[in-house]
Amino acid sequence: MEGLDGYTLAGKLAEGRFGVVFVAYSIETGQKVAIKKIRARRPMPGLNMDPWSQSAKREIEVLSQVKHHHVVRLLDHVASPESGNFLLVYELLAWDIATVREKKTLEESEVKVIMHMLFTGVAYLHSLEVMHRDLKPDNLLLEAVSGVLKIADFGSARFCPGASLPALGALQGLCAEIENDTHDCEQSLTNEVCTRWYKSPEMLFGSREYDLAVDLWAAGCVLGVLLSPTALALFEGMSDIDQLCCIFKLRGTPQEDEWPEVKLLPDYAKIEFTAVQRQPFAFASGSYSPESVRLAEQLLQLNPAKRLTAAEALASNYFLAAPAVADARSLVASLGNPDELLNRLSQEEEYGSDGSDFASPDWEFESIPIETTSCGLWDGVAAGTTSEEPYAPKAAPLAPAPIMSAAAPAAAAASGTAKVRRSTPPPPKSGVHRFKPGVL
């Protein structure tokens, strides 16, 4: 294989905007691995850098320095910034939490072991001042036999502004190569990260000074999926404004006395929402314990300063109260043989192991526009206009969507009108990507 001589390709697992994921074998050890090839693309309109390459550099920068049993291992990589080609080699993991949740209803003890592993991994990352910025069920992978959870997809991750680690200096040159990406090497942040359904209110309001609490909001959203009677995300917005509506209809509209800093956020005053009160979660009246509901409440605080930290969550009564945390192996025990699924996926289309997919022609990679920020939308700018055009008048108060009571999901299911599950929307097209469709 060009660039990685120690591996033999066995098949293609997935293909997306970012490139291709292959299953391969280490020639030396026989170990199965996943190889992600980042496709080189021409510069996009308005940019002089390739966001997919930027994403690969972020992963290399962070995963080269973080080593933990709940973080996916980067085994090898080949980076060629000049050509824009990147090959990243990871340990091969069979399942993700999204697949597990779709296949089975989780007992509370199983939800606890997932959240315990997640908080343990997040607490480690946060101790090193690493923000993941795209936590979601699809990016939480499980080992095939042990069920151990690994946090994956670090394409949006970064060290907090001002973070200082002994090994960081060696990678400053790599960071500096990310042209027009000053938020990675300097003090400012971007809000063009994180999959919308798991994006925190402060990011949706345009904050560029957020902190580690954005990961805890996302962790609360993950808990909501695990506890949901319908396996749906808590907040399924179709746009950034709609995402805020979905959040506010359940968590209530922001109150400045409870979140004083909200009025300082860039986009807070650009649109008004009809005031609504906080509502109970749909799972609050279900079979889960009050501690589960309380943990969700403590994570999904609008004010980021009031959210539990990962370390505080691990020490909370949630993990001390009955039922006890399950054995992680129960998560994967009924999912079948992952090798059979891997073999089927790799054989679904003919594939030559000569490495030809690693040298795709330029014409194959079409130009994809960067997703616009939501600032203009909140100002009332019509779709397709530019930031130089005059802003429209401030939007009228926007009412959140109708509130669904705790009993509504069960009633909808009984009447045959239950909401059809939608796939998680793709993250912004600025280099963030999903590892796989169902297996990696």
Image (tube, helix red, strand yellow):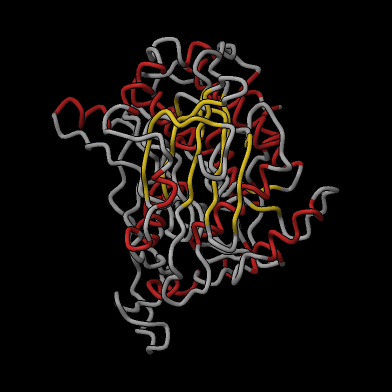
Q: Which quarter of the image is occupied by the C terminus? A: top left
The part of the image, by quadrant, that contains residue 91 is: top right
Q: Is residue 14 visible?
A: yes
- Where residue 283 appears, as percent x and y from the top left, is 40, 29
Q: Position of residue 125 (x, y in %)?
A: 69, 40
The percent position of residue 338, horizontal first and vertical second, equals: 41, 18
- Horizontal relation, residue 350 to residue 227: left or right: left
Q: 140 or 338: which is nearer to us? A: 338
Residue located 50% across and 39% down the image: 1
Check the image and name the residue furthest to the right: 166
Locate residue 127 relative to residue 232 in the image: left or right: right
Which residue does the image show at 56% across and 46% down from the upper left? 301
Is 142 rendered above or below residue 208? above
Q: Which of these two is toward me, 177 or 347?
A: 347
| Residue 286 relative to residue 326: left or right | left
Against 178, residue 219 (above or below) is: above
